[in-house]
Amino acid sequence: MAKVLVVTSGKGGVGKTTSTAALGAALAQRGEKVVVVDFDVGLRNLDLIMGAERRVVFDLINVAQGVAKLSQALIRDKRLESLWLLPASQTRDKDALTDEGVRNIIAELRTKFDWVICDSPAGIERGATLAMRYADEAIVVTNPEVSSVRDADRIIGMLDSKTVKAEKGEEIKKHVLITRYDTSRAARGEMLNIDDILEILAIPLLGIIPESQDVLKASNVGSPVTLNNAASTPAKAYIDAARRLGGETVPMVVPSEQRRGFMDRLLGRRAA
Amino acid sequence: MSMNLLNLLRRRPASAPVARERLQILLAHERGLRSQPDLLGVLREEILAVVSRHVVLDPEKVIVRMDRGKAVSTLEVDIEIPNGIEKRMAVAS
């Protein structure tokens, strides 16, 4: 049975696309057949993060409008053969996507894949509501920061009212993924900590992704962080999160910062 | 370097508890607002149904408003009834 996930947040720049790519690759590395779908029509970026930007021929809108077949628009990852990308359109405006078009595409993807991961655009407009519309489960991405948590709360409200599952009176399963977490800053009381966020949002925790240079490095070279450096702390956190999505019980690790010497601290040098 | 030394010596009070408290207050309010339009819609429909069993009403003239105060909230129902209603009620009884 295919599972349709939406990766959403409300706020922009919190790590939806990074997380979509990293979780998609982590699930595919486990042998699952995965497609990551970019719903950010007009501002696509998942292709770039996946390193497939020069291979886009047809896109989501072309398929939704019947211009291209789904098989023509799907791009197979060059590193993982069970990982696929369905890119968004760069030129069309976001109104080109219709509820019916999305419903048909999701229904077809369900027959071909184990996991369909929809990367939502920021905001609460049409693109974001269509990305979540047919999802079975939602991953709400948030940073430990007030505006991001507020928007996450708003998105949770929308998931509970605007998805097909919610309209049928069923519960849509929701997880929170905390990204850009800095354990030492949280410990010093400079940043909301995990318990604060979980108490406020009141949905289960999928994972804690540390603030890390490895995320930027991976995006620079167009490779999901779980593929680019699987031994790095953010990659390990994403791999654990992917295992939890698959139903495994994996102990939650609060990522710890690399140890810095006294002189480094004194001089304010950042650990690489 | 002098800044870092100063920070080490004079720890500023933690700001995260402030963030947490502000969020809790704000979200409690916003979650209330989210459910409010629905509640008011339902109340309006039901009040309209009950009153129009006895009186002929213009649905446009039924106003239901809620004000949230700190200690109590008030529900205000304003129904405009056309003139001549007393006569009709007298005939009916």
Image (tube, grey):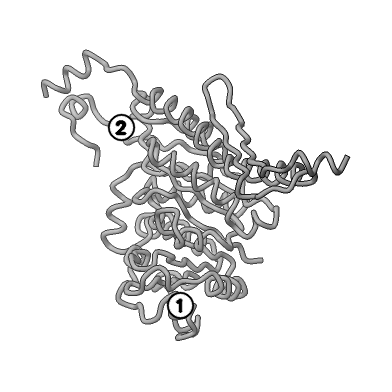
| Disc 1: which residue | A74
Q: In which quarter of the image is the C terminus of chain A?
A: top left
Give the image location of residue A80, x and y in percent: 44, 69
Q: Earlier in the sequence, mark 1 or mark 2?
A: 1
Mark 1 secondary-structure assignment: loop
Give the image location of residue A19, x and y in percent: 42, 54
Q: At 47% across and 73% down in the image, what residue appears?
A: A81
Q: For the residue marked with disc 1, what is the amino acid? A: Leu
Give the image location of residue A58, x and y in percent: 40, 81
Q: In this view, does A168 lie to the left or right of A225?
A: right
* Front residue of A196 and A160: A160
Q: At 32% across and 44% down in the image, what residue appears?
A: A212
Mark 2 secondary-structure assignment: loop
Kindly indicate whether the residue at mark 2 contacts the one at mark 1 (C-beta within 8 angstroms).
Answer: no
| Disc 2: which residue | A259
Mark closer to the observer (1, 2): 1
Q: For the residue marked with disc 2, what is the amino acid? A: Arg
Residue found at the far right of this picture = B93
Q: In which quarter of the image is residue B71?
A: top right
Residue found at the far left of this picture = B2
Say yes or no: labels 1 and 2 on the same chain: yes
Mark 2 nearby-residue class (10 Å; few <14, some 14–19, many ≥20): few
Q: Quadrant of the N terminus of chain A?
A: bottom right
Compared to residue A30, the image places residue A184 above or below, namely: above
Q: Could you say which disc has been placed on residue A199 in the image? A: none
Q: At 38% across and 39% down in the image, what residue appears?
A: A147
Mark 1 nearby-residue class (10 Å; few <14, some 14–19, many ≥20): many
Q: At 54% across and 42% down in the image, what residue appears?
A: B34
